[in-house]
Amino acid sequence: MQNLEELFSWIQDKIPPVFLNNLTRDFEHTEIFCVGGALRDWLLQRKTNHVDLDFVIRGIPLETLIEWLKNRGVVDIVGKTFGVIKFRPQENLSLCIDIALPRTEQSLPHSLGGYRDVTVQFDPNLPMQDDLSRRDFTMNAMAFSLTTKEIIDPFGGQQDLESKTLRAVGNPQDRFQEDLTRILRGLRFTCELDFTIEPQTFNAMQLLVPQLNHLRKTDGVSTYIVPRETIGNELSKAFFANPPQTVHLLQELGVLEELFPSVWRHMQVDAHYLEPVTRSKPSELEHTIILLLRGLTIEEAKTTLTFTGLDTIDKQSPRRLDVEHILWMIQRLQQHLTPQNILVMRASHFEKQFLGARGTQHMNLLEHLGHGTVADAAKKRRTEICKNWNCEEHEPIPSLITGDDVLRLGIPAGARIREILETVRDKQLDGHILTREAAIRFIKQQME
């Protein structure tokens, strides 16, 4: 593990010095702890694009702390009952620091495992070890004291980081039953960090996976205990980080059968169905999901994307999925093309499938699925078309005429217009018509 003085300096660089210095000056007996993912990732020497800073502050009542912070920045109390504050210091309003008081959590009577099915008691004088004991995994149950510059690690989180082991804090079944979301969170951590799951933790995850689809009825309305948005967020992060390991864990834990039943049914017929998915590369999320759903009907694929929450990823996220594009690509992959099909395909239809970025992805998917001869035939024809028009393969080829041009030639509006435009486009892409004038002459000839 790295030098703790370096860790202290790293944290100081991330937050305004006045925050640390003034807080400890104004409250003599306060203690500040860095907790959560930032500490874990620093200990792993893991570089991330975004650092979430989470602190626990002991020794100051919540209301007193809120008033002190309000005089030094913007305060957003996101969960007063949880003792959680988001703080943006005046020195850097773009920086958001999560601050909490030490707290304990206890599942509500008859809890079904929902994220908020708990009662929370926050106490400024609660020992830090008690706060850490409520957390999900040992690697997240550590705290670095900015006062003593020591790591508090009551559950062996540092050792588990060194051995690349995911281990639940305390009794694994209790941890997951408290919050079923932790099952998928654990799966995602395992894939992102390339860890292995400790056996008792694995068994508890596997045992409780069927509960991911349990429903809660409130006022006659049924809702999922684990929100689909949460499932989609965790699954997409796992697939984005490590497709092969994600597929393996989905099978081993029984998640595939519970969340992807249509895919699971295909596996019962084709034992090698998932093999192409296991060869997907990190960051190729859309490519991976298309391969995973490629054998499903369009209705099954659409239902699966909704059931797993994969169609709910935030629009600003790099993991956002274009559902319509995925469904379109699945349809294309189910055509069972041959090189001869590529050769005789109408040019305008070929363009829609194999030109531009969408066409490149289509050919990559065909190659991935072992249809190299079809992909090669498509590449050859695309190269010929682009050579005719002296353009790069990713560049669009402008149309020679529009529907208005056809109307001006005296052809009435209707399906005939589309037919003419497609015919001209065919001849343009095949290199038989190269100018606007030639296109108009061709249409006039067809009218004679």
Image (cartoon, grey):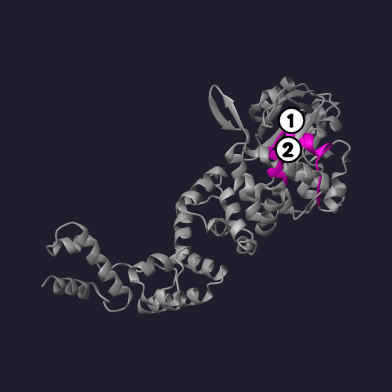
* Residue 271 against residue 374 in the figure, above or below: above
Task: Specify the segment rendered in magenta.
Answer: 165-186
Q: Nearer the viewer, residue 273 or 142?
A: 273
To which residue does mark 1 refer?
A: 100
To which residue does mark 2 refer?
A: 54
Three-letter residue code for mark 2: Asp
Q: Nearer the viewer, residue 358 or 98?
A: 358
Q: Position of residue 250 (x, y in %)?
A: 67, 51
* Residue 108 against residue 342 in the figure, above or below: above
Kindly report the distance in space between the C-alpha atoms of the residues bearing marks 1 and 2: 8 Å
Is 167 magenta? The answer is yes
Side of 140 where 311 appears, left or right: left
Q: Secondary structure at mark 1?
A: strand
Q: Position of residue 79 (x, y in %)?
A: 66, 27
Q: Earlier in the sequence, mark 1 or mark 2?
A: 2
Three-letter residue code for mark 1: Ala
Crowding near pointer 1: few (<14 within 10 Å), some, many (20+)?
A: many
Crowding near pointer 2: few (<14 within 10 Å), some, many (20+)?
A: some
Q: Residue at x 81, y 36 (%)?
A: 33
Side of 156 where 86 appears, left or right: left
Q: Position of residue 34 (x, y in %)?
A: 79, 38
Q: Secondary structure at mark 2?
A: strand
